[in-house]
Amino acid sequence: MKRLLTVITAAVLTASLLAGCGGEETPADANKKPTASKSVDEATGDAPGAGTKYCELLGTDFATLFANIQGPEDVNDAVDVIEEIANEAPAEVEDQWGVMQGALGTMKTALTKAAELQKKATAGDVSPEELQKETALLMKDMEALNTPENNKAGDAVSAHATEYCGLQLG
């Protein structure tokens, strides 16, 4: 997958901001925990890494995980999941995850800003024009993760996930 970090974070950022503009969260939504996608067991069944914590974590429903960001503490939890995946990475992709972990600070900062903006939007403290302007600035921060080094690492991790875990990322 090209630009793994950029794709994940751009989708996350968009989902976070859109969730903030989309209305009230229901109590049932507030209690949702990120889970592996329904097809993870099916996808990993015959793969060499089936049953490993790494593959299980890679199967996390990132859309749900990041769409449920309501504040900076939720950003920390979401970034912790990515860090946990990196820490569980097999030796074959350990260096690539290390490269991508270097970009987590940028991602965390942008997502924290997005969460704060989301709260302001929900409270009506930001105009639609300001929301659009701030969203564009945050997306620009995410685009900064689109480096040849991150792209190469993301491609390697994605290819390994397909082979080792039987998962298609992205």
Image: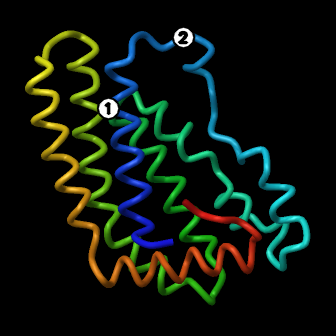
Residue 87 shown left or right of residue 128 in the figure: right
* Above or below for 125 versus 51: above
Mark 2 secondary-structure assignment:
loop
Pinpoint residue 100: horizontal percent, then vertical percent: 40, 73
Depth check, mark 2 against mark 1: the one in front is 1
* Above or below for 165 versus 118: below
Residue at x-position 51% and y-position 59%: 82
Residue at x-position 49% and y-position 79%: 155
The local crowd at label 1, few if under 14, some if 14 to 19, many if 20 or more residues have their Cα within 10 Å, is many
Q: Which residue is mark 2?
A: 26
Quadrant of the rendering where the C terminus is positioned: bottom right
What amino acid type is highlighted by mark number 1? Answer: Leu
Pinpoint residue 142: horizontal percent, then vertical percent: 26, 57
Which mark identifies residue 17? 1
Number of marks in picture: 2
Q: Nearer the viewer, residue 150 or 81?
A: 150
Pinpoint residue 51: horizontal percent, then vertical percent: 84, 65
Q: Nearer the viewer, residue 39 or 100?
A: 39
Pinpoint residue 3: horizontal percent, then vertical percent: 40, 70
Q: Nearer the viewer, residue 3 or 111?
A: 3
The answer to which image quadrant residue 72 occupies is: top left
The answer to which image quadrant residue 47 occupies is: bottom right
Residue at x-position 55% and y-position 20%: 30
Residue 108 shown left or right of residue 152 in the figure: left
Give the distance between the C-alpha atoms of the residues marked 2 and 1, in whole angstroms: 17 Å
What amino acid type is highlighted by mark number 2? Answer: Thr
The local crowd at label 2, few if under 14, some if 14 to 19, many if 20 or more residues have their Cα within 10 Å, is few
Mark 1 secondary-structure assignment:
helix
Residue at x-position 74% and y-position 78%: 164
